[in-house]
Amino acid sequence: MTVRRMILSFVGAGVLASALAPAAIASTGGWRFVKVYRSLAACQSAGQSVVGRHQAREYRCENDYDKAGVPVLDLYTR
């Protein structure tokens, strides 16, 4: 493989990655993970606080489990 072919391969991979990145972000709907909370009240309070400070338009708390299998809530904002 020549140096020129290797450079073109790397450039092609970079172009492909940059083209696919916005699609991956769009598929999440713009939601960004913030933090894990143990209770619904704590998650909602943190979400309302972030929205109240105009750092996000909206928030959501999703059910999840930690590594030990204990139920937790994930806070997402957008």
Image (cartoon, helix red, strand yellow):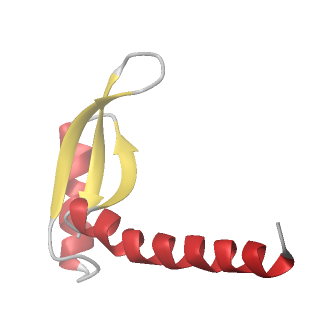
- The residue furthest front is 1
Residue 31, given in percent of the width and then of the height, sits at: 25, 63
Question: Is residue 60 in sight in this rendering?
Answer: yes
70 on left or right of 52: right
What residue is at 24 percent from the left and 69 percent from the top?
26
Residue 62, given in percent of the width and then of the height, sits at: 20, 42
- The residue furthest top is 69
Residue 72, given in percent of the width and then of the height, sits at: 31, 31
Question: Is residue 46 in sight in this rendering?
Answer: no
75 on left or right of 14: left
Image quadrant holding the N terminus, namely bottom right
Query: Between 33 and 18, which is closer to the camera in this rendering?
Result: 18
What residue is at 67 percent from the left and 79 percent from the top?
8
- Residue 70 found in image quarter: top left
Residue 74, given in percent of the width and then of the height, sits at: 30, 44
Marker count (numbered):
0
Image quadrant holding the C terminus, namely bottom left
When the figure is inspected, residue 55 is found, relative to residue 35, above or below; the finding is below
What residue is at 40 percent from the left and 70 percent from the top?
21
Query: Between 71 and 7, which is closer to the camera in this rendering?
Result: 7
When the figure is inspected, residue 40 is found, relative to residue 35, above or below; the finding is above
